[in-house]
Amino acid sequence: MTGLKKNQGCSLEQKRQQVEPELETISISSQCRLLGIHSSGYYYKPVGESAENLKIMRLIDEQYMQTPFYGVRKMRAYLRTLKIGINIKRVRRLMQLMGLETIYCKPNLSKPNKEHKKYPYLLKGVSIERVNQVWSTDITYIPMQKGFLYLTAVIDWYSRYVLSWRLSNSLEGTFCIDALEEALNLGKPEIFNTDQGVQFTNERFIDVLKSSEIRLSMDGRGRAIDNVFVERFWRTLKYEYVYLHSQDDGKEMFAGLKEYIKFYNECRPHQALDYRTPAEVYFDL
């Protein structure tokens, strides 16, 4: 047995020496793709906000889950009830960094990128009656002890099944495209709904949908309620997992989210699904 292990070790070492020169010629993104790791995870570093700001951002996020209609002024008033002295400018910057905005329609204070085409909202009054009728996606802020990440997920509206998800340390849109492409390995929706964020209006993201002949629907600007099923999932995820666990880094958060989303899909019954799980409904088990 000892000799066998030694020979195996030599064989593996020889293979490693043969492969290493080849890996040096492959880009980091290609290596991550071959290993099944998103490049944002490879490059992850804690986001450079102070411990005080990270604490305030977590409080803002928790309150936003309860009162998504709070704007900057109401959020500042809430923080002041906690004896946190903070000005409007700082609250606005942190909420923008977290990607939070109130759910009601409001004046368009920023001009959209003219190169990015917007699509109408197709789901008003539509009855959701079957799997793969409508999918949607969104991005949310995920707090940690030493920084924060952004999470995107693709969800089937009828079953509430989380088809795919990705974590990133930036709002660069590649991780959203990766999640979309993974979800399409499971099926194809008739309609795909998003908000008007630049991650979902850029040409690369839309081309993936067009090439699969999927109709694209977009929320009204500032109307998170148009994407209600994803918003409900974010609330469930944060109250049942994120706010109950203080992960130190991206690796721990990734492992924890992976375990929770598996539980959500396969073990957690939903009242709206007659107490079946999303996986049972999506796969008609």
Image (cartoon, rainbow, N blue to C red):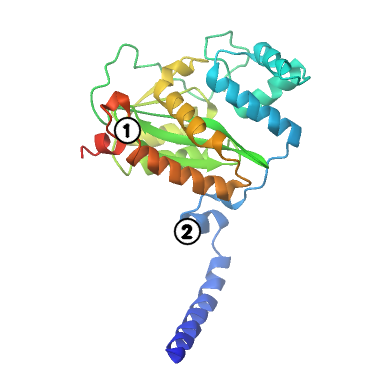
**Residue 94 in picture, x, y percent from top left:** 68, 26
Quadrant of the rendering where the C terminus is positioned:
top left
**Residue 39 in picture, x, y percent from top left:** 55, 50
Toward which corner of the image does residue 87 lie, by quadrant?
top right
Front position in the image: 90 or 214:
90
Quadrant of the rendering where the N terminus is positioned:
bottom left
Dots 2 and 1: beta carbons under 8 Å? no
Q: Is residue 117 above or below residue 28?
A: above
Residue bearing mark 2: 35
**Residue 241 in picture, x, y percent from top left:** 50, 37
At 51% from the left edge and 73% from the top edge, which residue is drawn?
Answer: 19
Q: Could one spot residue 100 in this view of the protein?
A: no
Q: Nearer the viewer, mark 2 or mark 1?
A: 1
Q: Is residue 101 above or below residue 140?
A: above
Q: Could one spot residue 94 in this view of the protein?
A: yes
214 vs 249, left or right, is left
Residue 246: give its label.
none
**Residue 240 in picture, x, y percent from top left:** 48, 33
Secondary structure under tag 2 reads helix
Q: Is residue 157 above or below residue 39?
A: above
Residue bearing mark 1: 269
At 52% from the left edge and 42% from the top edge, which residue is drawn?
Answer: 167
At 65% from the left edge and 23% from the top edge, which residue is drawn?
Answer: 95
First reached walking from the N terminus: tag 2 or tag 1? 2
The 10 Å Cα crowd at callout 2, few under 14, some 14 to 19, many 20 or more, is few
At 44% from the left edge and 41% from the top edge, which residue is drawn?
Answer: 260
Q: Residue furthest left?
A: 285
The amino acid at mark 2 is Leu
Secondary structure under tag 1 reads loop
The amino acid at mark 1 is Pro
